[in-house]
Image: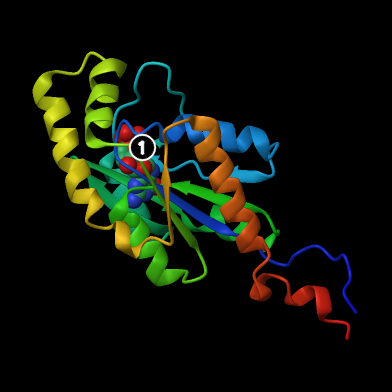
């Protein structure tokens, strides 16, 4: 018989996309739509906080020594070095949330996403792109006070990151934020309906 039992494990969701694509805005929209029932994983990083960023909210800011100790103690689900800084995801926090049936969202770059794929094959990997490279360039020029060479570096990095798109499950174009967030919500709904995620509904047959 099909019951209305709570699903057993949360869904692990990985979002990647080039710098300037508007990932944070899409994530904020998504979290608002799901009214806080997705847990956003706060990563550890060795990079310095930017203006407006708070420790424990945007990232857990740590020293290189602290980060390397976490690697040695095997406390990270994945980690990567990106533009000279370490970034990593806490294993315990993620496991606890997933085991409690809570969906977890990771905003991580492509090397980390590949590691999550290898360790957690059931994770859903979504890559967000801008409508075009011209638009990405326009957004990068418009959003900050970065020098031309920094912007050129980000565009070059984006080209490298695009090489990894075929290993993602879904590709979302962020032209309009509300539409990109709506597409991701549809993806999550479809994942939720996968037979393997619903077997608990028939376990009393
Ligand atoms: P930013 O310094 O601009 O906040 O982030 C730089 C890149 O690091 C982004 O692509 C972001 O998705 C990625 N990132 C953030 N946290 C993590 C993490 O825990 N692991 C990995 N592998 N990448 C991360």
At x 56% / y 52%, what residue is drawn? Answer: 93
Between residue 26 and residue 8, name the one nearer to us.
Answer: 26
Question: Image check: 192 left or right of 147?
Answer: right
Q: Residue at x 47, y 69 (%)?
A: 120
Residue located farthest toward the left when viewing the structure as drawn? 149
Let me know if residue 189 appears in the view.
yes
- Disc tally is 1
| Residue of label 1 | 62
Which residue: 32% across, 48% down? 109
Classify 95 as above or below 118. above
Q: Position of residue 121 (x, y in %)?
A: 46, 71
Q: Is residue 145 left or right of residue 125?
A: left
- The yes-or-no answer for disc 1 within 8 Å of ligand 1 is no
In what element is the residue under mark 1?
A: loop
- The image's colouring method is rainbow
The quadrant the N terminus occupies is bottom right
The image quadrant where one finds the C terminus is bottom right
Q: Quadrant of residue 22?
A: top left
Residue 10 shows in this picture: no
Q: Quadrant of ligand 1?
A: top left
Frontmost residue, 46 versus 185 = 185
x 22%, y 27%: residue: 137
Residue 104 in the image: state x and y as whole percent.
Answer: 57, 51
Residue 133: x and y in percent read 23, 36
């Amino acid at each position: 018989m099909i019951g209305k039992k709570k699903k057993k494990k949360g869904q692990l969701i990985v979002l990647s996309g080039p710098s300037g694509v508007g990932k944070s805005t899409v994530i904020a929209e998504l979290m608002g739509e799901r009214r806080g029932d997705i847990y956003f994983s706060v990563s550890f990083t060795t990079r310095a906080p930017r203006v407006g960023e708070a420790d424990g909210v945007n990232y857990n800011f740590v020293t290189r020594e602290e980060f390397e100790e976490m690697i040695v103690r095997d406390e990270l689900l994945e980690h990567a070095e990106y533009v000279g800084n370490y970034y990593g995801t806490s294993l315990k926090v993620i496991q606890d949330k997933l085991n409690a049936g809570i969906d977890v969202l990771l905003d991580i770059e492509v090397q980390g996403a590949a590691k999550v794929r290898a360790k957690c094959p059931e994770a859903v990997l979504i890559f967000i792109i801008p409508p075009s490279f011209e638009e990405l360039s326009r957004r990068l020029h418009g959003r900050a006070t970065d020098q031309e060479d920094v912007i050129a570096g980000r565009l070059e990095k984006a080209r490298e990151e695009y090489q990894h798109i075929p290993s993602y499950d879904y590709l979302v174009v962020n032209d309009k934020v509300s539409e990109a967030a709506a597409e991701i919500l549809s993806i999550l709904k479809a994942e939720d309906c996968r037979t393997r995620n619903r077997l608990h509904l028939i376990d009393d047959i």
